[in-house]
Image: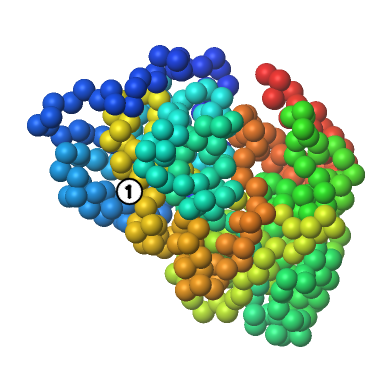
């Protein structure tokens, strides 16, 4: 469920609206289908996770069997998902239900590409408090709800138990701070592991939570980039300093791997910040790795985390929104949520039950109480890309943290003005 860079997709969304919003919202009961015929709708999502696609194929089959007046066709989209979805939206051939990552929610809201779900929610009796609160809010714009979250992840601190034992360090717990992590990383690199910590150089999804732990924010109340600030500078100096100053951290590319969780699984780093998606990955690829999971350490301003989530949405162009809603209500029901195994369910009670049965997910669930959505505004993908360039500039020694943050803030404000 991680968002992928889609520059062309976002550029198209940044252009004048491709769909005229006002003409699209016909009444919810507008489906003109003969009473003796099935209503045929289409449903699309990602193809990356076989466990997910297999479960959804089974669920769609069960839904069709129990709803004889409907026929849902499940069409997972391979390759560049969002550019393909946008192309279909422009052509008015989009699926009646599809995945929407929180990273792309605000661009969709801004262009009025989605059908509000408030009337359906009111009629169905589904209540916001049945879901993890931050997940539900993530797909709300103003007072309108546009998506029902299907599942989620947050970041957690994964640590190698054997390496900690070898170095004589107590396992991470709720008392850990960023200072504790830094000292442990240096000691582990010296006594117990090839590297103390595994970090990412070319993305901001690990740096920005640390920036918030120092008290920095990406945008101020007026929507201007707020990273040209002492708190953001101290956070970036801390994060980059793990590798550039302490020499206790390593990035995947420097270690010959492609991801931080592979770096961790291969035993090349004793600690990483990773999402709950690393838990099934490690079980499959590195079952001998003895590891634990804790919440991210706290910084001077407290704790922070990112909320990675995807919702089921209905495009404004759907001819059959009533049927589409029935599918969404089924897919986000308590019974179906209880069958999710590749992430934490979005329903609060289902998530709590799953974490109780699988304790490694406990810190992932706990972080949802203070995590913020993984999004960067209406032009989020371009903002995210610029921040990734900023990270590379610092790690490659091309510029210092203060200059990199100042230049990035200037460029991001220019992006958002376009």
Q: Point out the image quarter for the C terminus.
A: top right
55 relative position to 191: left or right:
left
Residue 329 makes an appearance in the image: yes
Residue 308 in the image: state x and y as whole percent: 56, 50
- 277 relative to 307, above or below: below
- 45 relative to 186, above or below: above
Residue 133 in the image: state x and y as whole percent: 57, 50
Give residue 410's quadrant in the image: top right
Give residue 22's quadrant in the image: top left
Q: Nearer the viewer, residue 287 or 233?
A: 233
360 relative position to 176: left or right:
left
Q: Which residue is mark 1?
A: 330
Q: Residue at x 51, y 65 (%)?
A: 352
Residue 249 in the image: state x and y as whole percent: 75, 63
278 relative position to 245: left or right:
left
In this view, the residue farthest toward the left is: 36
45 relative position to 246: left or right:
left
Q: Nearer the viewer, residue 168 or 28?
A: 28
Element under disc 1: helix
Q: Residue at x 77, y 62 (%)?
A: 298
């Amino acid at each position: 469920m991680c968002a992928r860079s889609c520059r062309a997709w976002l550029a198209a969304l940044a252009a004048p609206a491709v769909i005229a919003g006002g003409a699209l919202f016909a009444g919810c009961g507008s489906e003109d289908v003969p009473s003796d015929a099935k209503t045929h709708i289409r449903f699309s999502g990602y193809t990356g996770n076989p466990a997910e696609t297999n479960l959804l194929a089974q669920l769609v089959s069960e839904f069709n069997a129990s709803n004889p007046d409907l026929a849902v066709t499940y069409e997972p989209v391979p390759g560049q998902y969002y550019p393909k979805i946008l192309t279909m939206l422009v052509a008015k051939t989009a699926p009646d239900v599809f995945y929407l990552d929180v990273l792309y929610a605000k661009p969709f809201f801004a262009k009025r590409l989605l059908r509000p779900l408030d009337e359906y929610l009111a009629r169905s009796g589904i209540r916001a408090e049945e879901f993890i609160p931050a997940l539900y809010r993530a797909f709300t714009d103003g007072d309108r709800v546009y998506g029902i979250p299907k599942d989620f992840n947050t970041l957690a601190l994964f640590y190698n138990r054997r390496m900690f034992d070898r170095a004589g360090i107590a396992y991470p717990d709720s008392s850990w701070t960023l200072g504790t992590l830094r000292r442990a990383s240096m000691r582990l690199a010296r006594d117990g592991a090839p590297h103390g910590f595994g970090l990412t150089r070319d993305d901001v999804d690990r740096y920005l939570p640390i920036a918030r732990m120092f008290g920095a924010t990406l945008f101020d109340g007026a929507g201007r980039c707020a990273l040209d600030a002492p708190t953001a500078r101290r956070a970036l100096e801390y994060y980059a300093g793990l590798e550039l100053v302490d020499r206790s951290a390593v990035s995947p590319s420097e270690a010959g791997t492609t991801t931080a969780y592979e770096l961790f699984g291969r035993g090349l780093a004793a600690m990483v910040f990773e999402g709950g998606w690393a838990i099934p990955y490690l079980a499959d690829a590195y079952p001998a790795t003895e590891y634990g999971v804790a919440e991210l350490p706290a910084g001077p301003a407290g704790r922070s985390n990112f909320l990675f989530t995807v919702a089921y949405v209905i495009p404004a162009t759907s001819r059959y929104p009533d049927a589409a809603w029935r599918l969404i209500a089924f897919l986000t029901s308590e019974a179906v949520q209880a069958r999710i195994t590749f992430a934490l369910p979005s329903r609060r009670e289902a998530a709590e039950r799953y974490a109780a049965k699988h304790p490694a997910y406990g810190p992932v669930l706990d972080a949802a109480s203070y995590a913020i959505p993984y999004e960067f505004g209406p032009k989020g993908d371009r903002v995210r890309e610029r921040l990734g360039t900023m990270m590379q500039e610092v790690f490659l020694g091309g510029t210092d943290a203060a200059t990199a943050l100042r230049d990035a803030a200037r460029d991001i404000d220019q992006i958002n003005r376009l």
